[in-house]
Image: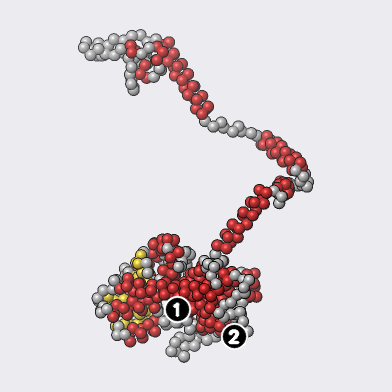
Amino acid sequence: MDSTRVSHNLGDPKIRQVGFFVPESSTTDSHKILSPSHLPVPEMQNSVHGQVTSRSYDPSENRNLETGIEKREDEEIEVIKSRSKPLKEKTTKAERRALQEAQRAAKAASSNVEGSKAVAGTGRAALGKSTKQSSQKKAGPSSPVAADKKAGDRPLDKDRKKDAPHPRLQFDDESRMEKARRRAVVNPTESRTRVELFQHLPQYEHGTKLSSLESKFFHLDLVHPSVFEVGLRYSAGEISGGNARCIAMLRALQDAIRDYCTDHEKALVRYLTAKINSYVSFFAECRPLSMSMGNAIRFVKSRIVNLSLNYSEFEAKTTLCSDIDRFINEKIILADKVIVRHAFTKIKDGDVLLTYGLSCVVEMILLYAHELGKKFRVVVVDSQPRLEGQALLRRLVAKGLSCTYTHINAVSYIMHEVTRVLLGASAVLSNGTVYSRVGTSCVAMVAHAFRVPVLICCEAYKFHERVLLDSICSNELGDPDAIARVPGRIDVNYLDNWASEDNLRLLNLMYDATPSDYVSVIVTDYGMLPPTSVPVIVREYREHLLM
C-alpha cells in the first residue's frame, strides 16, 4: 500500500457549501437558519503543509440537523394545505342516496307551502313542473317586475324575427309545399321524372308554367301588368343574364309603385312592403330569383322603411322611383364602366384571351380594348344546350375582332395558347366562391392546371354574405328535354321517349360553384382584389353596396 496516501475517516461527511455563505462570526444565534450554508463543515486540507486536519464526528449534530429539516418540511406542508382549496370529502353511495332523499323531501315541503298541487311520489319531472307553475302563479301578471320583463322581451323577440332571413323553401317538405300551393298564383305540373339528389329544388314540367300564366291573364287582379309581363318573359326565357333580369325586375317594380294607391287611414310604408312581397313571390314562381335580384329587393325594401313619415304619398313614390333609378345607374351601368377600365390594364398586345359563354361585362371589356387599338385574339368557349357563346361570337366578329370558337370539351387542347381567362359571374359569395353558369368551374380548373390567370369580372352588388361549398344545395334546374336534343341534327332522336324509361333521369343544371383556389383576381367597381377580400367588402361596404 502506498505510504504517502492519507487515510480518511469513513464516518466524516463531506458537505459542499451551496449558495450565499455567511460566517458564523457575523451572525447571531437568533438569525441562524438551517441551510446548506450554515451546516457544520469539517476542516479540510491545509494548503501550506499538505496535511489534513480533521475533527471527530458527533452523531448528535447530525441528528439535530435531520430533526430541524423535518420540522421545517412539516411547517411548509401545513402552510400549503392552509392556502389550497379544501378537497371534497369522499362519500359512499348510501350517503349520497340519503342526501338526495333529504333534498327531495325538502323540495316537496317547500312546494306544498307555496300551494302546489303536485302529488308526492310522481317523480322529479312532475315535481319540477309543479314548482315552476307555482312560482309563475306567485309572480303573476300583477307583479310589476314580471310585467316589465315580459313587455321588454316582446319587442326584442319581434325585431329578432323580423331581422332573421326568410328560410328558403325546400321542395321536398310536403307540409310547406302544401301551403305554398294554396297561395301560389302559378300552378305548374310537377315533373314525374324527378332527380332524387335534387328533390329540394323545384322540378316542374317545362311549358306548363307559361300556359298556366297565360290562362290567368284576365283573372289576376292583384298582379300589376308590368310585373305580369316580366314574369311571362322570365318563364319563356326571353330575359337572361343577371344584370338584365335585375333591371327588368326593378323597372317593373317602379311601374307598380307609381300606380299604387293607399287609403287615407293606411300607412304607405306598411302596405307597400306587403305589396312588394307579393310581387317578389310572383317573380319567384315564374323563375327562381338570382342572388343579385335578392340584393336589389333588399335595397328597395330598405328604402321603403327609411321613408320619412312627413312625406306625402306622391313625394314618397317619387323618392322611391328616383332611388331605384340611382341604383340601376350607379350599381350596374357605371359599375360596368369602372370594371372595364380596370380590366383593360391587364390586356397587352399579342394576348390570347379566353372567355366562356356570354357575359355582358366581358363583351364590353373586349370591345373597349379593341377600340383603343390593342392587338389580341379571342377564344370563345361554348357549351350545350344554350350555346350562348354564338351570340357573343357574332357581335365580336361584326366589330372586326379575331376570334376562335370551340366547345368546352376541347378547352384543354386550346388552353396552352391562352394568356388570360376572362369570365363573368352571377354572384360572388363570402368564402370567395364564384357562382356562375354551369361550365365556369371546369374552365377555371383547366386554366389553373395550365397556370393561366383567371380574372372574374363581377359588380359589387352581386356580392353575397352566404357561403357555398357545392352546386347541390343551391341551384336551378333547366329543361331536361333541352339536353336530349342535338341542335342541327334532327336524325339524332335516341332520347325522344326518355320520360317513359323508369331507370333514366336527365339533369340540366344551370349554375355551378367555382372554388376560390381557381380564381386569380376579381375585378369589381371597388378595384381588383383577391377572393379572400370578398368578406371584407361585404362587411365594410354593405351599406354602400345597397345605397
Indicate the position of residue 46 as horizontal and vertical percent values. Answer: 25, 12
In the picture as drawn, the residue positioned furthest to the top comes out as 56
Mark 1, secondary structure of its residue? helix
Q: Nearer the viewer, residue 434 or 111?
A: 111
Q: Quadrant where the N terminus lies?
A: top left
Question: Which residue has dot 2 on it?
Answer: 217
Q: Nearer the viewer, residue 393 or 242?
A: 242
Could you tell me which residue is drawn at 38 percent across and 76 percent down?
361
- Is residue 499 among the parts visible in the rendering? no
Classed neighbour count for the residue bearing mark 1: other residues with Cα under 10 Å, few (<14), some (14–19), many (≥20): few
Q: How far apart are marks 1 and 2 (CA)?
A: 24 Å
Amino acid of disc 2: Phe
Q: Are marks 1 and 2 in contact (CB under 8 Å)?
A: no
Classed neighbour count for the residue bearing mark 2: other residues with Cα under 10 Å, few (<14), some (14–19), many (≥20): few
Could you tell me which residue is drawn at 39 percent across and 78 percent down?
360
Amino acid of disc 1: Ala
Question: Which residue has dot 1 on it?
Answer: 244
Picture quadrant where residue 86 is located:
top right
Q: Nearer the viewer, residue 197 or 298?
A: 298
Q: Which of 149 and 124 is in front in this view?
A: 149
Indicate the position of residue 66 as horizontal and vertical percent values. Answer: 44, 17
Indicate the position of residue 486 as horizontal and vertical percent values. Answer: 45, 86
- Is residue 90 among the parts visible in the rendering? yes
In the picture as drawn, the residue positioned furthest to the left comes out as 48
Mark 2, secondary structure of its residue? loop
Picture quadrant where residue 441 is located:
bottom left
Question: How many dots with numbers?
Answer: 2
In the picture as drawn, the residue positioned furthest to the bottom comes out as 491
Indicate the position of residue 156 as horizontal and vertical percent values. Answer: 59, 57
Please indicate whether residue 231 sits to the left or right of residue 130 in the image: left
Seen in the picture, residue 515 relative to 205 is either above or below; the reply is above
